[in-house]
Image (cartoon, coloured by chain):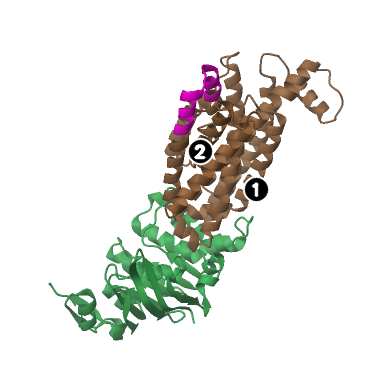
Amino acid sequence: MSTPATVAGRRGLRAGTLIATGVPALLLSIAVATTIGPASLSVGDVLSVVGTRLGFGTTEVSRIGQGIVWDLRLPRILLAAVCGAGLSVCGAVLQSLLRNPLADPFLLGISAGASTGAVAVVVLGAGSGAVGLTTGAFAGALVAFGLVVALATVAGGGTARVVLAGVAGTQLFSAITSYVVITSADAEQTRGVLFWLLGSLSRGRWPDVALTAAVCAAVLVVCLARAGELDAFAFGVDAASTLGVSVRTLRTVLLTLTALLTAVLVAAAGAIGFVGLVLPHAARLLVGPGHRLVLPVTALLGALLLVWVDTLARTVAAPLEVPVGVVTALVGVPAFAVLLARGRWSS
Amino acid sequence: MSLRAREVSWTAAGTVVVDRVSMHVEPGSTLGVLGPNGSGKSTLLRLLAGLRRPSAGAVYLDGRELAGLGRRTVARRVAVVEQQVGTEVDLTVAEVVALGRTPHRGTWGGMRAADESAVDDALARTGLTHLARRRWHSLSGGERQRAQIARALAQEPAELLLDEPTNHLDIAHQLDLLGLVRRLPVTSVIALHDLNLAATFCDTVLVLSGGRAVAAGPTGDVLTEELIRQVYDVRCELVRNGPGERPHIRFLPR
């Protein structure tokens, strides 16, 4: 007879296998993706450039080749991995906290606010050049989140109010963005803004990678420490409270942290949709609902997906680039449909 | 002394839902909270669980004020089974029961041996061991209610609060469930609609009407034809021929 322990055990084993194969797969993907592009390079070249930069030996790769690997492709690909991981983790946490399977990192007005901030900088020249697009987007995201939280609090708090306030905030900031773009932007600016709104990793440089990776790692650690309490929300807020969770404190801390992470990610790469909404569900279909397993697995899936999707986005219509958010949906939706159908048959 | 409430009130949007109710329950006994719809039974249970803060008065657990204890401390002592709970999450029965270990687990800790054995024990006590791997969504109403009780037992509580746990269950399941609760070595407070179930299973009862406590004491003493007429506005015949001279109530057409 199988005891309940073996059920959790089997899922744990499965997650263990996924992580044990997923981490090498991710590293290999990053290396392979770095070789793909107009200038042809081998995995050996990539490893030798990385080795040299980290202080191990010298490389025979040309200066230009070194520049392409280290300054152009690698930071962009690493940013893709971090964005994928971060957005997925935010989505998983928000879906549990707000008890809403449709919750995603942009639900609380963050992407809309970031867009408004970025547009204000690019189109209106707010801050007169001293403020970059990234800073503008970050500031816009935090302002929007603050407004959404204030509105939710005024409306009496509670899960449903937070979601409604988020929807209202998103609509408001989208409208402001549209208004500014329609009335003030020229065609060139409109195209640039639109591209950024749909998500693009093309501006990824090492400082972006360092910042996003640090914030992402910190948020992941905090969320993992709270994994058991996130599980306790399964039967609602009151049930979580009777299981010993300080609901108000936990919700405040985790909403703020996920908002901060999302703001950092959106500022670096625009609003990349689909990942944060769908990958947590994919992770749950694979390893069950426990957050101790869901969080690392969804982070890994998100990183893998976005590395390859971004590679596709910059090569499929080369030299044109397709916004990465467009590709996440085009590739991700069929993949998710297959997973959904399989999950249903196997249960 | 187990759970005690002193003059607790709770007001929502200007309406007094619970009005200066005092109560206590003897350790190891079963207290039934009775009263018509809207009399404040569920709200009183929520105040006792610390889910709502009384607008006046206080709830005490072993003489210490509940509001001053952390949620985790309370959850290790008091478990709650709500009326009807649902979830979007695809959980197995074992995973639902394991949620009861939440207040006992450390920040990073997975399930330890003590957690596993508490879950196994809770499943065995509620007769759910063979369903441990079944999905929550595939369970019947009675099985779900039992799984929630198993989850509460996995908390290893000294006090168990149940809000109309027999709603939507057929008569056999009602008897099984209350028999199970009564056999448990815990102090129970159960909000109930069915007066005959209360008469059969509760040591003492507290009767609420319009948010106020109108009677309290041993079940056989409190339940009378006169009280039932006053509180529920129905006529009945009450005979004391149940097991241990417990009252049995036959309602008369209005």
Tell me the green chain.
B
What shade does chain A have? brown
Could you tell me if residue A209 is visible in this image? yes
Could you tell me if residue B179 is visible in this image? no
Q: What is the secondary structure assignment of the residue under circle 1?
A: helix
Determine the image quadrant of residue B225: bottom left
Q: What residue span does the magenta drawing correspond to?
A: A175-194
Mark 1 or 2, nearer chain start: 2
Q: Nearer the viewer, residue B166 or B214?
A: B214
Whole-angstrom CA distance, mark 1 to mark 2, is 21 Å
Residue to which mark 1 is pinned: A221
From the viewer's perspective, tell me whether residue A200 is left or right of residue A43. left
Q: Residues within 10 Å of mark 1 (few under 14, many from 20)?
A: few
From the viewer's perspective, tell me whether residue B41 is left or right of residue A188. left
Determine the image quadrant of residue A79: top right
In the picture, the quarter occupied by the C terminus of chain B is bottom left
Q: What is the secondary structure assignment of the residue under circle 2?
A: loop
Mark 2: amino acid: Phe
Q: Position of residue A91 (x, y in %)?
A: 53, 41
Q: Please, is residue A292 above or below residue B35 in the view?
A: above
Badge nearest the viewer, 1 or 2 = 2
Q: Position of residue B222 (x, y in %)?
A: 29, 84
Residue at the farthest left position: B254
Tell if the residue under mark 1 belongs to the same chain as the one under mark 2.
Answer: yes
